[in-house]
Amino acid sequence: MEHTHYLIVGASHAALSALHAIRLHDAEQEVTLLTRDDSLPYSPTVLPYVVSGRSDPGRVFLRDESYFARQKVNYRRGARVQKVDAEGSAVELADGSKIAFDKLLLATGAAPMLPAIPGLSGLKFHVLRTLADAVALRAELPRVKRAIVLGGGLIGMHAAENLAKGGAEVSVVEMQPHVLAGYFDAEASSMIERVFAANGVRLLLGASVASFAAQGEGCRARLMDGTELDADLLLVATGVAPVTDFLAGSGIATGRGVLVDEHMRTNVANVWAAGDVAQARGFFTGESIINGILPDAVDQGRIAGMAMAEDPGSMSYAGGVPLNTYSFFGQHAVSVGVHEGSLDPAGVEVKKQTDAEQNSYLKIVLKDGRLAGIFGVNAAFDPGIMWELILRAIDLDGDKLAFLRSPQDTARALMSKNWR
Amino acid sequence: MGAAYETINFKAEACDGCNDCMTACAQAKAQSEDQLQSRIQIVPSGDGFELAICRQCGDPECVLNCPAAALSKNAGSGVIDWDGSKCVNCLLCTVGCAYGGIAYDSVSSHVIKCDMCDGAPACVKACNAGALKHITTGRIYNEVGNLEDLFEPGLSGCQGCNTELIMRHTLRRIGPEVVLATPPGCIPGMGSVGYNGLTGTRVPVFHPLLTNTASMLAGVRRFYKRSGRDVMAVALAGDGGTADVGFQSLSGAAERGEEMLYICVDNEGYMNTGMQRSGCTPYGAWTSTTPVGERAHGKTQDAKNLPLLMVMHNCSYVATASTAFMEDLYAKLDRAILAAKTGFAYLHIYSPCTTGWRFPSDQNVEVARKAVESNFVLLWEFNPQDGLQFTHPVENARPIDEYLEVLGKYRHLDPDQIAHIERTLANNLARIRGFVAAKGTASVEAGRA
C-alpha cells in the first residue's frame, strides 16, 4: 500500500495553508495532497468571477506545479476519498486504491445544500462550488435572458450581479426578509438591496419556492404566495454544508461538521480537520460552530499544519469570528464580529451612523468597552485590524470616544501600540 | 537560502505629522493630491504619530487569503505584488492584514498597497523630518550569502559573540585567496587555529606571537608576491594584541606601507584570558585588573585612540566600523581590501563583548548601535588623498547614560566618572571634527586651483 507521512485531503485555502505551515517546520517528510479536481488548486471564492468573466479560468490557480515540486509535495489530481479507516490510518480512494498515512488532515470543504423543493430534482439547474460548475455556468450565459437565483447569500448575490451585468433579467428568491442575513442587519442589507434594485435585479424577499416545473430548456417556479417565475437558467445557492458522509464508520466524530479541538485535532489522535468541513469553537459563545469563511480556513489550516508538524511554536485556535467582505456594483460592505442581538445585553453599546446621500453605513458594537462587531457599507476601516482587536479583547479604555468617532485611524494607532 | 529585502523604516519619535510622505505617495502612485490615495498612512496617536503601511511580510497572510492568486511575494524584490488583472475586488486581503497595509481605495475602486516604488520610495525622499528611512542592507546579505563561509560551523565563541560575526563576515568577503594571521586572543581561542592539526578556518591560518603579527604577515605577503601570486595577507587580531603588545610590529609595517589588511576587533580588553584591561579599555570600565571595590572604581585612564594613531602613520586606508551598521562596514571592507593590494589598510571594528562587558547575549547589536548613536564610537574613514571624513555622523546623540546603563562594567560609575567620560567623548569628537575640517579646507582650495 502507498504510504505517506502527511496526507492532506483537499486543495483549497485550509489545505494550502496547512501545507505551508508544515513545510515551514518540516522540510523533508513526505506530503501527499489529494484533490478531487483535475486541476491545480483554486478557491471556491473566485468562482462567481469566473462566471462573470472577470477571472480567466486559466489564471485563478493558487499554486503551480513548480511550487509542489519545490516543496516536495506529491500533488494528486482526480483523487476523491470515499472512505477513511482511522484505526488502520489509511484512506480509500474512489478507484479502490488505498493510501496509508501517519497524519491526516481533512480539508474537504463543503458542498451545496439542495433544498427539498418538489420538482427540483428532475430539473436542469446550476450550483457553484467547483471550477467546472463555474465554467459550465459561464458557457450558458450568452443564451440566458431570464434567470432565477435561489438564495440571497454571498454566492447567490455575486451570481445575481454578474448575471445582471451580462444582460439577464434576474430574480433572487430569498427565504429571509433580507439578503446576506448572516452578516448584515436589516438596515445595511436594505442599502445593499436598493443598489441591486437600482441595477435591475428583482429581489423576492421572505419568499420561497413551492414547486418547480421544467419548461423547455428552463423552468417555472411557483412561489408560496402563488407568484410564478419563468427562467431559462436556475442557480441554486441556498448555502453549503460540510461533506462528512465519507467519514461514516471511520470513528472520526462529526456533528454538523468534523468536530475538532483548539489545535484542529479530531477525536482521533492522528487526524485533524480545518476549513469549511471543520466544526470548531466559536469566539463569542465558546460553542462549537462552522465558521465557513476564507480567512478562518487559512487560520485553521495553519494551526492544524503546525500541530501536525509538531512545530514548537504551535498556536491554539482563538475561536471563529464571523466576518466577511462583499463588493457589489462598485460599492463595498464589510462585516467583522457579531451584532448586539447575539450578545448578553449587559455592557453592550451600539453606535450607528448612516449617510443616505453617500449610501454609507457604519455600525460599531462594543461589549464591556471592547470591540465585538463592526459593520460598514462604503465605510473605511481595516477589517484585519478590527479582527485582531476582537481576538485580543483589547480594552478601548480612554480611546473609546476616539474609536467611535474615527474607527480607522484610532484602530491603526491601537495596532501600533499593541502589535506593531 | 532565504533572501533579505529592502524595507522602509519608520521612526515614530521623529515624525512631525507633516504628511508630506502621503502627498508624495499619492502623487507618485495615483497622480493625485488626495492623501487618501497614499499607500503610506500616517495616523495621529496620542501626542505623536504612527504608521500604517504594507510591511511586505515574510509570511504574508494577505497572499494566503487571496482567492484569485492576485497577490504574491516577489522572491526577487520581497515586495508583495498585486496583479490588477487577477484581482476580483473581494477585499479578503484586507481581512488577512492586521497592519492596515492593504486597503480599499474608493477612488480607484480596488485595493491599494505599497510597492516600494521599484526600490526608490517616494515617501522616503519626501520626508524631511528623518522619520522615514529606506533600509537597503538586505542587498549585502543576498550578495554575501552566496559566498562561502570560510570558517567552519561550531566555533566555540561565547553565546551572542559579536567577534564571530565579524570574523565570518569579513573573511567571506575577502575570499579564499588569503593567508590569515590570528594572534592570541578570542579569535584563536574560539577555534580559528584549532588543535590536533585541525583549524576552524577553510583557508591557511597561522598563530603568530602577540608581538609579531604584522611583521610575519609582511613576510608572507612579500614571499607570495615574489613568487607571482596575489595572496592577501590579513590579520584578525584583538585590541590587546594590536594596541599594546603587537603595536611595535604594527607601527613598523604601517610605516613601511606593507601590503596587508589589518583588522582590529576591539572588545576593549583581553577578554579571552580573563577580562584584563588593555590600552583600549575606556575610562571607568570594570575589568579583572581594574576592579571595583571600596577604593578602586574601574580603570583610571582613558583608552588610547588607536585608529587615529594609525591615521598618523598615513596608511593607505584607515576606518572605524560597527556591526550595527553593516552597509557602512561593508563599504569600508571593500575599500580596505582594495587598498591592501598596494599598501597598508587598517580596519578598527568595535565588538561589544557579552561576557566581559556583562550584558545579555541577545543585546549585542543593540549595544553596538547605542555606542554609535551616543557618539561613544565614531564612524569615519581616512585615506591620504581625501583625508578623514565621517561616514555616519550622529547629530542628535543619545545621552551617554543610555549606553552606559546597559553594560555591567559601568554599573558602579559615579556622577564624576560619567562627567569624565562625557568630557572624553566631547574631546574625541572635537578632535575628529578638527581632522574633518582641516581636510575640508584643503580640498576646497584644491578645487579652486
Image (cartoon, coloured by chain):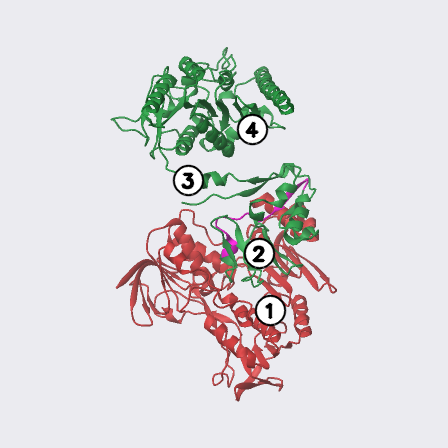
Residue B50 x, y percent position in the rendering = 63, 43
Instruction: Find the distance from the CA under tag 2 to the CA under tag 1.
Output: 20 Å
Can you identify the residue that label 3 sits on?
A: B145
Callout count: 4
Residue type marked 1: Leu
Residue A19 x, y percent position in the rendering = 41, 56
Q: Which span is picked out in magenta?
A: B46-63
Instruction: Find the distance from the CA under tag 4 to the CA under tag 2.
Output: 41 Å
The kind of secondary structure element at disc 2 is helix
The kind of secondary structure element at disc 4 is loop
Can you identify the residue that label 1 sits on?
A: A180
The single residue placed furthest to the bottom in the displayed view is A216
- Spot the red chain and give its letter: A
Residue type marked 2: Thr
Q: Do the residues labelled 2 and 1 touch (CB within 8 Å)?
A: no
The kind of secondary structure element at disc 3 is helix
